[in-house]
Image (spheres, helix red, strand yellow):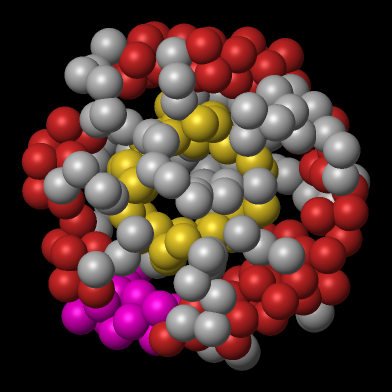
Amino acid sequence: MRAGFDPRLYLVTDTLLCAPRSVPEVVAAAVSGGVTAVQVRDKTAGRRDLLALTRAVQDALRPTPDVRLIVNDAVDVALLTRADGVHVGQDDLPPADVRGLLGPDALIGVSVGSAAELDAVLALPAGTADLVGLSPVWSTPTKPDAGAALELDGTRALAARARAGGLLSVAIGGISAATAAAVAGTGVDGICVVSDICAAADPAAAARTLRSAMAGELVAR
């Protein structure tokens, strides 16, 4: 795992849910409320638009350099912006190839939704991946094709195996302030949130509420 990366409250952006506000505006507010990592994700944007969006989010994060910037899928955008890392899904570039492109200091996350998918990540050479995104905890409209819900027991089982294998883990999918404490208590290193922050009238307050709900639940390494 890369030094200094704090995944406790990990925001994954959604451009449509942020509207009419800009994504950088929502990100800046959310970080002021306690978000510790940001992933730029926009599956509908072309590469030029995604590059511009990532640079704008990067500018919004300059006052808070400890908040790491991750790009979803787009290794080329991560390289051009010198983002902190990339998160890939099961149908994206293989993690070993991403590591080869980005080098040893990049953060690389991989989505896993089953024991078999986690096995594949654990079988990679040491240092290939840093983090697994356990998804979905529950079904979510922001990613309707995410697969069967892990729920709390499934999340707990995968988090334990990831930790034993030296990987950080974050949970994503249907998590809200009402469920954040229960998910944080499964042994993950953090929770990922999309709509509960992006669609919030006050993203800073939403982030504070999530941090408060999680307080004391995450297990320190």
Magenta segment, which residues?
Answer: 44-58
Give the left or right position of residue 86, taking residue 8 as reference.
left
* Residue sitting nearer the eye, 21 or 70: 70
Residue 10, image x, y percentages = 59, 53
Q: In this view, does 35 lie above or below 24?
A: above
* Residue sitting nearer the eye, 47 or 87: 87
* Picture residue at 74% right of the left edge, 28% below the top: 219
* Residue sitting nearer the eye, 75 or 50: 75
Give the left or right position of residue 79, taking residue 142 as reference.
left
Would residue 50 be counted in the magenta stretch? yes
Q: In which quarter of the image is the C terminus?
A: top right
Give the left or right position of residue 176, taking residue 46 as reference.
right
Q: In this view, does 116 lie above or below 155?
A: above
In the displayed orientation, state which residue is furthest to the front. 3
Residue 203 appears anywhere in the view: no
Residue 29 appears anywhere in the view: yes
Q: Is the magenta stretch mostly helix, strand or loop?
A: helix
| Quarter holding residue 76 | bottom left
* Picture residue at 19% right of the left edge, 56% below the top: 75
* Picture residue at 50% right of the left edge, 18% below the top: 162
Q: Is residue 183 above or below residue 106?
A: above
* Picture residue at 53% right of the left edge, 44% below the top: 144
Q: In which quarter of the image is the N terminus?
A: top left
